[in-house]
Amino acid sequence: MDNSLVFELVTTNLAHQQLWDAVQAKKLSNLDIWVVNGVPPHKLSNDDLELGNEWFLPLELQQYSRGSLTLELADQIFAELKCRRIILGIVNDDGTVVYYFMYKGLHKPKKN
C-alpha cells in the first residue's frame, strides 16, 4: 500500500485549506507508508484536553474501499506512532479530501 503520491494532496489541503501549522510528511520505518502530522488551529473533538500533534494516514478512496487498510496494518501504524488516534485522509478521484477519526481500541462516543 504505497501512498506516497496521495500524501502531497492531503498535506496541501491541511496547510492551505484547513490552516494547520507545522504540517510535515514522514515515511514509517517498518512499513512502506507515508503519514502526515501537524497541529490543528482548534480542538478537533470535545474530549481533547489541549491542542497537540495529530497524525494522518492519507488513503485513496479505492484503497479504502477494497480493504487495503486492515486491522493488522492499523495496529502496526499505532505501534510505531505511539498515538491514541489517527485521522484517515481519504482522497477521492476528483481531489476532494474527507477526514475520519480512527481510534486505537474502543473509544467512548462523544456526547452531543
Image: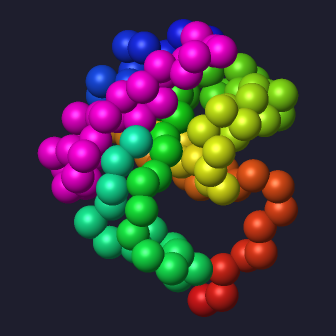
Residue 106: where, in percent of width, then height? 83, 62
Q: Position of residue 17 (x, y in %)?
A: 20, 49
Q: Residue at x 54, y 48 (%)?
A: 87
Residue in the picture at 55% in, 21% down: 28
x, y (%) of residue 85?
62, 53
Magenta segment: does it hold 27? Answer: yes
**Is 49 above or below relative to 94?**
below
The quarter holding residue 111 reads bottom right
Give residue 55's position: percent from left, percent from top. Answer: 49, 45
Is 106 on the left or on the right of 109, as rendered? right
Colour scheme employed for the rendering of this structure: rainbow
Q: How many marks?
A: 0
- Location of the N terminus by quadrant is top right
**Residue 91 visible, this orientation:** no
Between residues 92 and 49, which one lies in front from this camera angle? 49
Query: Residue drawn at (65%, 33%), measured in percent from left and top?
Result: 80
Tell me where residue 73 sits by quadrant: top right
Quarter placement of the C terminus: bottom right
Q: 58 and 26: which one is in front?
A: 26
**In this rendering, would 27 be left or right of 24?**
right
Asked which quadrant contains residue 2, the reply is top right
Camera-side residue: 22 or 11? 22
Please provide the residue range marked out in magenta: 10-36
Looking at the image, which residue is at 58% across and 80% down?
47
**Above or below 109: residue 33:** above
Q: Is residue 11 left or right of residue 49?
A: left
* Of the pair 71 and 39, the residue shown nearer to us: 39
Q: Is residue 23 visible?
A: yes
